[in-house]
Image (tube, rainbow, N blue to C red):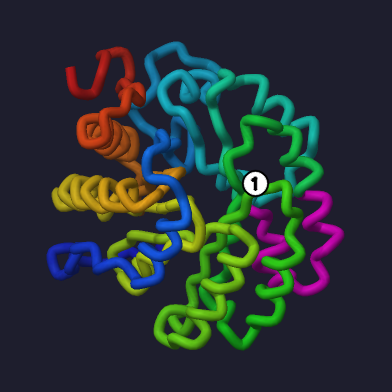
């Protein structure tokens, strides 16, 4: 089963819930008159997943992708520990403004379940530090069976993670969201460390829409349901981001997925166009293949 996938999206209430009370208070600590830093991208750059996105003849997928998007959520680093040489290759294929958001390797998050991983974390951080200014944030995605019973390991990880590398955390076990005491503990630890609390918008796990920010970053992983509602859902996100911006949001990291990857570039372009209009931004709108702008 694909995480968060449902058989019939028509039965899902896709409305965004109200913000957690803590979100406004956290954002109030930041100025509301600064420019919003926005990065929007897909989860992958390969042709197999992004069908129809690349013009004929494109040989270097990442190099072309980086001409259309300003960021990428890197799932490839989840499956294999990256090396410095490989990071240099990725970075050198992209323009100056581009940023990478690599996922922490599963040997740390899933196989070791954060136990005795200091050396592995050091190895990972040494490698991804080669992105230099092109590093947006790394993110930790925990196994959906990693429960609050293992909180001490996560608490230590958050407190000990290298301070020079931005981190965002995604928990999946239902108890992280249903038990207020542990949700508060996680939130307070992230606030203390100035790290981001990832929000996931996916059909089958509406509890992961906790709407609880822990610093000036909104790190959102949006999963389309391959359904007509996907575009309306993005429009609602734009309205919520407008509110957050007025309250002090400084950085938006928004990554578009689909359970069956067909329209991620289309959804991303729709979102970027709407965000540009709503917030008077000028983020380039991706093109589809060789036909020009998706909205021409």
Name the side, left or right, on which 23 lies relative to 161: left
Q: From the viewer's perspective, is residue 92 above or below residue 17? A: above
Please state the total of marks drawn on the protein image: 1
Q: Residue 118 colored magenta?
A: yes
Residue drawn at (21%, 49%) of the image: 239
Q: Give the residue drawn at x 81%, y 44%.
A: 126
| Rendered residue at 57%/84% (across/down) | 148
Residue 279 in view = yes
Figure check: 96 above or below 46: above
Query: Where residue 31 appears, x then y in whole percent?
Result: 43, 46
What secondary structure is marked by label 1? Answer: helix
The residue that label 1 is drawn on is 77
Asked if residue 266 shows in the view, the reply is no
Q: Is residue 17 above or below residue 176?
A: above
Q: For the residue carrying disc 1, how many other residues have a C-alpha within 10 Å: few (<14), some (14-19), or many (20+)?
A: some
Residue 46: x %, y % from top left = 49, 33
Q: Position of residue 67 (x, y in %)?
A: 46, 18
State whether residue 204 is above or below residue 73: below
Q: Nearer the viewer, residue 176 or 160?
A: 160
Position of the C terminus, as image quadrant, is top left
Judged left or right of residue 266, residue 88 is right
Span of residues in magenta? 104-124
| Dominant secondary-structure state across the stretch colored magenta | helix
């Amino acid at each position: 089963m694909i995480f968060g996938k449902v058989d019939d999206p028509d039965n899902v209430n896709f409305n965004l819930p109200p913000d957690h009370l803590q979100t406004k208070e956290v954002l109030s600590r930041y100025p509301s008159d600064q420019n919003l830093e926005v990065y929007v991208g897909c989860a992958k750059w390969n042709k197999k997943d992004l069908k129809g996105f690349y013009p004929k003849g494109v040989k270097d997928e990442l190099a072309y992708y980086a001409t259309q998007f300003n960021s990428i959520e890197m799932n490839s680093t989840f499956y294999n520990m990256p090396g410095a040489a490989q990071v240099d290759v990725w970075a050198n294929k992209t323009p100056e403004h581009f940023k990478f958001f690599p996922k922490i390797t599963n040997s740390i998050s899933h196989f070791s379940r954060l136990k005795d991983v200091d050396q592995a974390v050091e190895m990972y951080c040494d490698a991804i530090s080669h992105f230099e200014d092109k590093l947006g944030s790394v993110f930790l995605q925990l196994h959906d069976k990693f429960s609050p019973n293992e909180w001490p390991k996560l608490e230590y990880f958050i407190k000990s993670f290298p301070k020079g590398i931005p981190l965002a955390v995604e928990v999946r076990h239902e108890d992280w969201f249903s038990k207020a005491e542990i949700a508060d503990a996680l939130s307070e630890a992230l606030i203390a460390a100035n790290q981001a609390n990832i929000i996931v918008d996916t059909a089958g796990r509406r509890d992961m829409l906790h709407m609880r920010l822990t610093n000036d970053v909104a790190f959102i992983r949006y999963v389309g349901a391959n359904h007509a509602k996907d575009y309306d859902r993005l429009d609602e996100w734009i309205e919520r981001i407008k509110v957050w911006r007025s309250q002090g949001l400084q950085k938006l990291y928004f990554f578009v997925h689909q359970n069956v990857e067909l329209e991620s570039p289309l959804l991303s372009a729709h979102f970027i166009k709407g965000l540009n209009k709503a917030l008077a931004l000028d983020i380039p709108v991706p093109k589809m293949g060789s036909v020009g702008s998706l909205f021409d």
